[in-house]
Image (cartoon, rainbow, N blue to C red):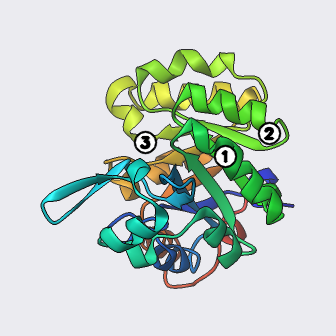
Amino acid sequence: MPPMDSEKLFILGHRGFRGKLENTLPAFRRALRYADGVEFDVRMTADGKLVVHHDEDFRSGSRTYRLSELTLAELKRLHPLGKVIPTVGGVVRSFPSAVFDVDVKEAETSEGVVRTLERAGAVDRAILSADSPKIVLSLLRECPDCRVGFSIVGYSSLPWIPRFKGLHSLHVPIDAVSYIGYNAVVSLMRVLRKRGLRIYLWNYEMDELSWVPRFLPFVDAVISDDPARLRKVFYGEREGHYGDLHGR
């Protein structure tokens, strides 16, 4: 049974590891020493290639470049991390047993992401997520049988939750405690889990080591900024997947 469907908590590395090498193959390799899978972001280059990158642009020297205006070859030549920025297909092929949370940043990539996962036989170990309601709707239409998640990014996200049909998971930021409070976040999680949604906890700019333990009883997965540090704090030096160590 895939970790996404089991009753055990599982861990995904947020962009592999947040930091200078995030969203690169080295970050994913390191994360998978401690986690069940990785979360990563997808955008499209000018020549239609699906690449793993969080922002729509980047700086190199004194210039700012937009990914949508560069070919894959130009991106690899101009980006400071160009040599280690992977394509989605490259990630899926490199880690044939990992779980993926594919954060779709642009609606036009939805079809290509689904087709890439299908060709690799990886749909059953993937979650497709987005913080844009438009993109979530496009994913639900493009692949009704896929696990699709919606990421909350603020108050404006909340009214959309009941409008989605067939949603797999709700991705709740720890940061929500700063604008609706801890008790309200827990109440929301409980209500949504009763409705059959899985809860994925992620972090923007909070101290995850302080907050993750408080939310563990109410979540199904943690998208961790630093899976190694999280594992060390909770489980000492022993290596292994959280799903194997923390039964639900």
Q: Residue at (68%, 31%) from the top-left corner?
A: 138
Q: Mark 3: which secondary structure?
A: helix
Q: Which residue is at the front of the view, 38 or 244? A: 38
Q: Is residue 26 left or right of residue 32?
A: left
Q: Amino acid at mark 3?
A: Ile
Q: Amino acid at mark 1?
A: Leu
Q: Nearer the viewer, mark 1 or mark 2?
A: 2
Tell me the crowding category of disc 1: few under 14, some 14 to 19, or many 20 or more residues within 10 angstroms, Cα based: many
Q: Mark 1: which secondary structure?
A: strand
Q: Quadrant of residue 107?
A: top right
**Residue bearing mark 3:** 174
The reply to whether callout 1 and callout 3 are in contact (CB within 8 Å) is no
In the rendered view, tell whether residue 126 sits above or below residue 25: above
Which label was assigned to residue 128? 1
CA gap, disc 1 and disc 3 = 20 Å
**Residue bearing mark 2:** 143
Tell me the crowding category of disc 2: few under 14, some 14 to 19, or many 20 or more residues within 10 angstroms, Cα based: some
CA gap, disc 3 and disc 2 = 29 Å
Q: Residue at (74%, 32%) from the top-left corner?
A: 140
Q: Which residue is at the front of the view, 169 or 22? A: 22
Q: Nearer the viewer, mark 1 or mark 3?
A: 1
Residue 129 appears in view? yes
N-terminal-most mark, 1 or 2: 1
The N terminus, quarter of image: bottom right
